[in-house]
Amino acid sequence: MDRTERFYRIERLLRERKVVPRHVFLDVLEVSLATFKRDLEYLRERLEVPIEWNADKGGYELGSDRKVELPGLWFNDSEIQALLVMDAMLADLSPGLLEGHVAPLRARLEMLLEEGQVAPDEVRKRVRVLRQAARALPAGVFEVVAAATLKRRRLSIAYAARSTAEATERVVSPQRLVHYRDNWYLDAWCHLRDGLRKFSVDAISSPVLLDEKAKAVDMKAVERELDRGYGVFAGRNVDWATLRFTPARARWVAHERWHAAQRGRVEPAGAYVLEVPFSDTRELMMDILKYGADVEVLGPPSLRAAVAQEVRRMAARH
């Protein structure tokens, strides 16, 4: 039994039995008294677990002044390494997000990993996340938005819509946070518009957490309203795009996820036909155009015409 496993056993015994005599620990852990004392010292001083000796009850117990609950927060070395990899990814995806809350947990994970074969700094050096077109988030906005979402509270915001350059103040009931293409979005019930809307978190300013509970919206209704279209553009009137990719690009596109409901098939000659739902052409056209002459829009006619028009506009500029 390694030390991490012993830490887990100690914590579990204290929670299950409340008061645990010393001899029970020694029997369960199968260690010497000296080793047990070293484990207690590490838990108390390095991980700040308030384990106290109760002379009246003749055993150890968790102090009543403990600041945090830690059930299940004990991991083996491979699990800690995985968490540190996730931490590195989060830091690269959104630097500074929840830093004050994550830092204490990160410090404890690094302490637990000290005896392992992989140093935390090595994990961060070897894991790299490349971001593309990520928009900067205003300081402090994400934490307030996330708190409102998780605590199920209404949120007062100022929102600058890019499509109209209009800035409005509104109250929303957050339903979920979505990280999509390196940017954060808030799916919420907008009390100003009386409906579900998707908000770019980077376009939110002056967020205020309100005392009033958020309006409850069934998640299936949220998905039905906001997930049926393509990308971040929602809409109830959904059409299907049919795209044919050349054999040279088929091997890549066949393994890409454009939409959760997409359909695809390989033609006898090696081309790949992809079908995806959409309610707004803007983001879909960007993804189509990046494949240039290796993709053909088979339908619907309106999308085919829109892509052809955009290609002509591009050609006129070059």
Image: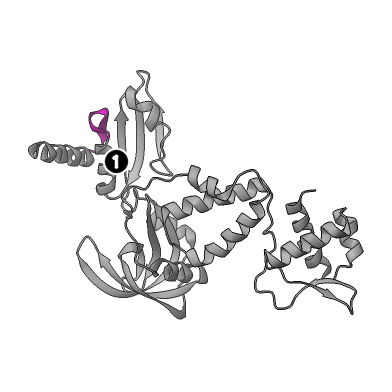
- Report the label total: 1
Question: Front-most of 108 and 213?
Answer: 108
Q: Residue furthest top?
A: 269
**Amino acid type, residue under disc 1 in the picture:** Asp
Image position of 148 with respect to 184: above or below:
below
As for residue 187 lying within the magenta part, the answer is: no
> Residue 114 at what x, y percent from top left?
65, 51
Image-based side of 159 in relation to 73, left or right: left
Q: Position of residue 25 (x, y in %)?
A: 86, 61
Q: Residue at x 19, y 63 (%)?
A: 164
Query: What colour scheme has been applied to the protein in the rendered image?
Result: one colour
In the image, which residues are magenta? 291-300
User: What residue is rendered at 48% in x and 64% in y?
Assistant: 99
- The residue beneath circle 1 is 287
In the image, residue 190 lies at what x, y percent? 35, 70
Viewer-proximal residue among 132 and 189: 132
Against 292, is 193 above or below? below
Residue at 42% x, 68% y is: 145
Secondary element under disc 1, as helix, strand or loop, is: helix
Q: Is residue 295 magenta?
A: yes
Q: Quadrant of the C terminus?
A: top left
Q: Is residue 236 left or right of residue 30?
A: left
